[in-house]
Amino acid sequence: MDNFGIYTLANDVVFDQLLALLNSIEMNISPDIPICIIPYNNQLDLVRQEVNSRKNVILFDNWEIIQRWEEFAHQVWAAHPREKETKISRPSWYKSHLQRKFVAFEGIFDKFVFYDADSLAMKPVTNVIHKLETSDFIFDDWEHLKDRSVAALDISVIEKTGLYTEADIRSKLHCSSFFASKRGLFTVKEIEIMKERLITDREVEWINGHGWWDDAFLFSYMTLRCDRPLFNFTLSPNGKDRTGNCANADPFINIDNVLYNQDGLKPIHRIHYMSYSSSEFARLCQGEDINICYRNEFLYYRFLKQPEQRPKQLRPPSMITKTNNFFQKTIKKLQRTFR
């Protein structure tokens, strides 16, 4: 039987989210499934402590593989037309390490599912594993419906090559917050060929400038160009497969601390808190009244093993806290703009 496991990408900054994710996997998938945490950077003191306390969790430590994927992404983005533009136009995630999640393709599991750390697992992944028998990539998101102007790939540019139609392209548009795949699909040789196409043949221009430096946009290019079978649950002919997953956009129903799609009470794979910062979750866990959708569900899983530490009551932020948060957000925005 193939070796199967779960990956996530984390560091101490997202520790509260990581803990909630790990607990949700234990409750809603399996307490024994192996989990590998890919280090976002070297801020890992809390992460290492948690890894040591759990028998089924390890830290990915092959830095040669991590560095290879870092260099691939950095070289590709350096060739993008947006790189030559003013620093003011750079996206907030400029020079991030999100591409490290791709080390899963050279990792320890034959087959795997990846969850972003700002997610909660809501049901077993049996159907995901089953889909891997006929497809090499499994997704569950609605990126394929986005307008051309904000889609991962520049559909107009690609259509002009005559290689793909819009239908071909849209079926391969996806995010990178949740996906399943197999080890060995992107070999060192294949990545070198892809890098040649992106940089020398200027296929980097296929990637929409709106999402420049976005790992999901690069991932959509990779899955399109490698021409391997892909399945997205939101494109499934079975209506039971098509659900929401985003905390601030989709309505869910809580049944025994498990969320279901409000329309039809369909089980969801995960809830993704993509629009909230790690600092907001940290303040919430410290008892501050932060406006996060489905925050009670998050708090349940975050303090599942430490219920006595869960805030008994959420307090409104003081005027000093509000002022400090405002200045911190302003400073971070300026730093992102002029870095």
Image: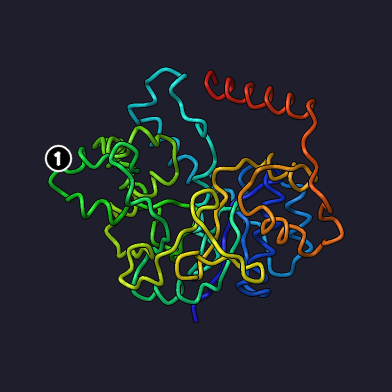
At 37% from the left edge and 50% from the top edge, which residue is drawn?
143
Label 1: element kind? loop
Q: Nearer the viewer, residue 333 or 215?
A: 333
Amino acid at the residue labelled 1:
Lys
Question: Counting other residues with Cα less than 10 Å from the Cα at mark 1, is it few (<14), some (14-19), or many (20 or more)?
Answer: few
Q: Position of residue 138 (x, y in %)?
A: 40, 64
In this rendering, the answer to whether 53 lies above or below 167 is below
Question: In the image, 239: left or right of 281?
Answer: left
At 65% from the left edge and 65% from the top edge, which residue is drawn?
24
Q: Position of residue 136 (x, y in %)?
A: 37, 66
Question: In the image, 214: left or right of 13?
Answer: left
Q: Position of residue 130 (x, y in %)?
A: 42, 77
Question: In the image, 176: left or right of 165?
Answer: right
At 34% from the left edge and 38% from the top edge, which residue is drawn?
150
At 55% from the left edge and 21% from the top edge, which residue is drawn?
339
Q: Nearer the viewer, residue 116 or 44?
A: 116
Q: Position of residue 219 (x, y in %)?
A: 39, 49
Residue assigned mark 1? 160
